[in-house]
Amino acid sequence: MGKNSKDNETAGLIGIIGGVLMFLAGVTGAANWAKLGEIAIEVTGQEYLAIVFQILVLIGSLGGLVVILGGLLIHEKIMKGDQKMRVTTGIILITLGAGFGLIGLIIFLVLTFMGKDPMINFLAGIGLGFIGLLMTIVARYKAVI
């Protein structure tokens, strides 16, 4: 087993665990995109924005699951096939899932600090999700094509 295989096994496991933590913490971004959509419609009065934000909710709701799938693709012993294509696709999926999760986390933070008891909500929501996001970033950069 070469260095690339070992690196990819490690990156895959880190990505899978990060995706699970994101999923468990709800850092998929779906609820936050929905709240942001409601605010945008209320502020602008443009009802068509509901469709745009529904699409973002759909994509955002898959954040942790997309990261898990990316980790599975990168992991050498779990998925077989053309390494370059498999790892590249895994990296793209982790990047998309982590990106939506990060945007969702930022929206969560903004909405939390606008609400009641911001510090309690902040501390409760940031823990697992933040660790999961950090793990996805590590997995993405540890993967070797």
Image: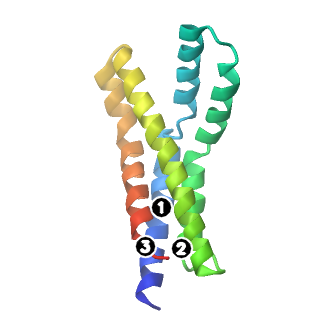
Report which residue position mark 3 lands on: 10
Q: CA distance from mark 1 to mark 2?
A: 9 Å
- How crowded pointer 2 is (Cα within 10 Å; few <14, some 14-19, many 20+) is rated as many
Against 22, is 123 above or below?
above
Residue under circle 1?
15
Labels 1 & 2 near each other (Cβ < 8 A): yes
Q: Write the residue at 54% across / 51% down.
A: 96
How far apart, in angstroms, are the residues tagged by discs 3 and 1?
9 Å
Q: Residue at x 42, y 21 (%)?
A: 111
**Dot 2 amino acid type:** His
The residue to which callout 2 is attached is 75
Front residue of 137 and 65 = 137
Image: 66 above or below 128: below
**Is residue 49 depicted above or below 81 in this figure?**
above
Q: Counting other residues with Cα less than 10 Å from the Cα at mark 3, is it few (<14), some (14-19), or many (20 or more)?
A: some
Image-based side of 10 in relation to 48, left or right: left
Local packing at callout 1 (Cα closer than 10 Å; few below 14, some 14-19, many 20+) is many
Is residue 24 visible in the rendered image? The answer is no
Q: Secondary structure at mark 1?
A: helix
- Looking at the image, tell me whether mark 3 or mark 1 is earlier in sequence order: 3
Pointer 2 or 3: first along the chain:
3
